[in-house]
Image (cartoon, rainbow, N blue to C red):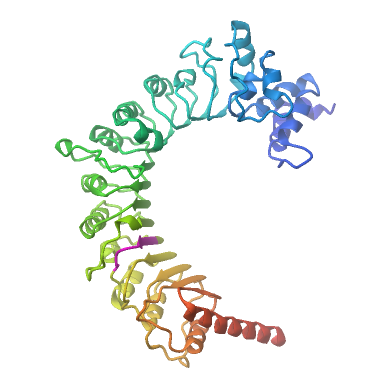
Amino acid sequence: MHQALLVPEVLLEIFAYVNTIPSTQTTSTQKSLAALARTCKIFHEPAMDLLWTEIHGLEPLLGCVTRLHPLIYRRGTRWDEPWAKGAEPLSAHEARQFLRHSSRIRTLNIKRTHPQLISVIPAEACVFPRLRSLSLSIAYLNLFLPQTLHQCYLLTVDEGLQSFVTHCIALEHLYISTGTLYCDNISQLSLLSDRIRWCTRLVTLSCPMLDWATWKHLSCLPTLLNLEIDQGYDSRPSLSKQDIVNLSPFLNITTLSFRRLYGATDIITVMQHSQFPSLKEFEFEASHLSLEEAEQLFHALSHCKAYRTLQKITICSFDDKFARPYNDESLTPIPHFLCFTQLRTLQLMFRYSCIYLDNDMLLQAMSSWPHIRTLEINDSALSSKVTLHGLFTALGLCPQLHTLRVSINIPTIDVDPDAEPIQHTSLRTLQLLNTPESQIADAETLARIISAWLPCVDHIYGPGLSWDEVNMHLGSLRAAAASYVVRAA
């Protein structure tokens, strides 16, 4: 054996590289590590540590029990088969076999287990002392209490959560699924809110809607950077109007996400009583937003003190079962967002509402957002006041724009096809949602203009056959230009 392999640091570096080699049909990383572990005593421990560092399910550990090994690994057995049905609980000796490699595990993903088998293991035994990441869909939290745990995914909540959050003092990333909580009972939400207030070092939290006391706790948490609330489209209100209090500023939160909301009332209330001076990304997704709620949300976001930091805004409302008859009133989010001078991405999707935008407003927006890279406005506008000339004028103010999606009205082409173009060389993806009133009268001329002004756009995404004709002419122009370059070379 080469002397270099006797140096622990060198050996660990080599094994770490082996652990990154992708598996193939003939070999796998696990088989390679297992072979190394059997090679010699020097290789055994570091190879076994890597072999057991990430485990999916308890079957690999149960397979270390002599009595259960043939049940789990017999030929033809599938992982989802009830192999443990009728099996006797582990004895004290078998429990030691089960725990033989538990101290090596750093990442554990458990979707199902067999409680009758592991009943011999005492509660709060901390059988995985080096565990750092846990994904759990069972109510056996008392078995997972290592002080080293940094990340945890839970699909259920039980009384064991209190011991869990108090013992796992290093917990930084907590993800709790919505589905099972709303399917069971609302008391679990109260339990969840209470337990989350025990977490004092959270960096990332993803969970259902919380009560005011927990919002107050989180607003004072200096470590919290990422917060996601997933309501699971549940319609029951979560916040008591009697307990409303002004929250402390969420000083360090950079990402704030509200997903699968039934309505916006609770979230608007939180936004109105909060400040997010470090916010960089804001995401909001609801099944329906009334005109009044939407304007309240826009206003609350514009007053959250993030005008120097906010870079991404995504707001969606698209559930068709709430579709209402169209009216002439329009949403006006753009004026509210002009204060966000560092904006890179703005995505607005209102399937059954109209967003007001005209040439002057688009020009003002682009002058306010010099760093904008993605602008997508997808609404149900029956008409658009943005013209081709207004679009090109605004594009001159946003040299970094890469993706653009807006409604445009082009009953007549208001750009001279023979005028000297001011080219925008960053735009790659262009989707123009022409309205029913905006039929394309001259597809060939429009293709010439786009080819000259937007040299990096090879295809325009848009509804209807009119854009197919434009893209056909645009493709011909691009092919002719490429052929000319080849001949000139």
* 19 vs 385: above or below: above
Q: Residue 169, can we see it?
A: yes
Say which quadrant the N terminus sits in. top right
* 54 vs 331: above or below: above
Q: Residue at x 84, y 29 (%)?
A: 2
Q: Quadrant of residue 455?
A: bottom right
Question: Observer-nearest residue: 405 or 172?
Answer: 405
The answer to whether residue 347 is magenta is: yes
Pinpoint residue 436: horizontal percent, then vertical percent: 36, 78
Pinpoint residue 418: horizontal percent, then vertical percent: 48, 93
Q: Residue furthest front?
A: 86
Q: Residue at x 29, y 62 (%)?
A: 337
Pinpoint residue 254: horizontal percent, then vertical percent: 38, 47
Q: Residue at x 34, y 81 (%)?
A: 437
Magenta stretch bounds? 346-355
The answer to whether residue 309 is magenta is: no
Q: Quadrant of residue 89?
A: top right
- Left or right: where 87 falls relative to 77: left
Say which quadrant the C terminus sits in. bottom right
- Left or right: where 454 falls relative to 47: left
Question: Observer-nearest residue: 47 or 6?
Answer: 47
Q: Residue furthest top?
A: 92
